[in-house]
Image (spheres, grey):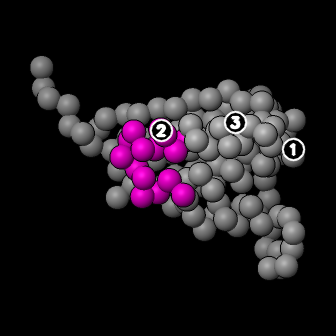
Amino acid sequence: MAPVSDAHLVHRLTMNLAVEPSEIGGIRRAVIRFLRECGLDSISDDVVLVIGELLANVHEHAQGVCELEILQEGEGLIVQVSDTVTSPPTLRRGSASAEAGRGLLLVDALTEHWETTITATGKVITCAFRTE
């Protein structure tokens, strides 16, 4: 049997969520714990902030129901949030004083890449992070 390289190890966290504001802290702690176990402390602030923004959108637009999946493989980390709403989120270029609508600007700034895929049952937002 050939040895398995650390670069190809896969770590996965999947959570089926009913997002309520009171639950966000527990979700963040679970994500931080997972990232620590993967040795990814250096990007945990960015990942947690992105997930928080995506979950805020789920709470506001998708009745709070979603699946969160985080996959670490090799030099990358993928975060996916799936919900049942088929309309894609819109990246708005709002003013700095706007009180809402800037979450996707943060997602765009903190990820290497992000995209929305419309599915037969809703949508999946996929965010990629570099881990090195």
Label 2, label 3: how many angstroms apart (C-alpha)? 19 Å
Q: Residue 34 carries which label?
A: 2
**Earlier-in-chain disc, 3 versus 1:** 1
Q: Horizontal placement of 113 versus 84: left or right?
A: left
Please give the range of residues in magenta: 31-45
Q: Nearer the viewer, mark 2 or mark 3?
A: 2
Residue, x 69% and y 50% (percent of image)? 52
Q: Horizontal placement of 7 versus 65: left or right?
A: left
Residue 39 falls inside the magenta stretch: yes
Q: Helix, strand or loop at disc 3?
A: strand
Label 1, label 2: how many angstroms apart (C-alpha)? 27 Å
User: Can I make out residue 30 in this image?
Assistant: yes
Give the residue number, with chain letter if any, for mark 1: 61
Quarter location, residue 53: bottom right
Q: Residues within 10 Å of mark 1 (few under 14, many from 20)?
A: some
Query: Are the residues flagged by discs 3 and 1 in contact, CB closer than 8 Å?
Result: no
Q: Horizontal placement of 44 versus 54: left or right?
A: left
Q: Which residue reaches farthest bottom?
A: 96
Image coords of residue 75 (percent x, y): 35, 50
Q: In this view, does 4 lie above or below 60?
A: above
Q: Tell me the kind of residue under disc 1.
A: His
Q: Which mark is residue 25?
A: none
Give the residue number, with chain letter if any, for mark 3: 82
Label 3, label 1: how many angstroms apart (C-alpha)? 12 Å
Residue, x 29% and y 38% (percent of image)? 8
Q: Tell me the kind of residue under disc 2.
A: Phe
Residue 72 falls inside the magenta stretch: no
Quarter location, residue 61: top right
Q: How crowded is mark 2: few (under 14 residues within 10 Å), some or many (20 or more)?
A: some
Residue, x 86% and y 73% (percent of image)? 98
Q: Tell me the kind of residue under disc 3.
A: Ser
